[in-house]
Amino acid sequence: MKDPHDIVKGMIRTEKGAGMLPLNKYLFWVDRRSNKIEIKSAVENIYKVKVGGVNTLMMRGKLKRVRYAVGKTADWKKAIVTLKEGSKIDIT
């Protein structure tokens, strides 16, 4: 079994994510190969909360240019985790 910290790499704190906090939704940067069941159990294990649902998105990397060379940032996966009533993650 995978380590929960290998699945959930970190929490994403953006303005869009802050607007989702009243809805009890949190954004996480997760491993590209992980599925919703693994993400749910990892968040419950790390943050000791009850997860109601998980939605995932594949984020495409952007094209970047440095001088004359063109490159691309890596593709990554984002998870929107909805917690059950009464559960909350302290983000301070």
Image (cartoon, rainbow, N blue to C red):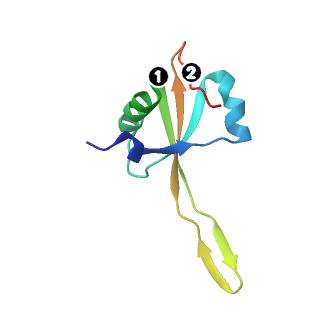
- Against 66, is 25 above or below? above
Quarter-of-image position of residue 68? bottom right
Q: How many marks?
A: 2
Dot 2 crowding, Cα within 10 Å, few <14, some 14–19, many 20+: some
Residue 9 badge: none
* Dot 1: element: loop
Write the residue at 68% across / 22% down.
22
Marks 2 and 1: in contact by CB < 8 Å?
Answer: yes
Would residue 32 appear left or right of 86 to someone viewing this image? left
Q: Nearer the viewer, residue 84 or 8?
A: 8
Work out which quarter of the rendered image holds the C terminus and state it.
top right
Q: Position of residue 82 (x, y in %)?
A: 53, 26
Please state which amino acid type lies under the numbered disc 1. Val
Write the residue at 47% across / 27% down.
53
Q: Position of residue 70 (x, y in %)?
A: 63, 80
Please state which amino acid type lies under the numbered disc 2. Lys
Would residue 30 appear left or right of 25 to someone viewing this image? left
Residue 88 badge: 2
Q: Earlier in the sequence, mark 1 or mark 2?
A: 1
- Against 85, is 10 above or below? below
Write the residue at 59% across / 28% down.
25
Q: Between marks 1 and 2, how big is the CA–CA gap?
A: 7 Å
Would residue 41 appear left or right of 89 to someone viewing this image? left
Q: Position of residue 44 (x, y in %)?
A: 42, 27
Work out which quarter of the rendered image holds the N terminus and state it.
top left
Residue 49 badge: 1
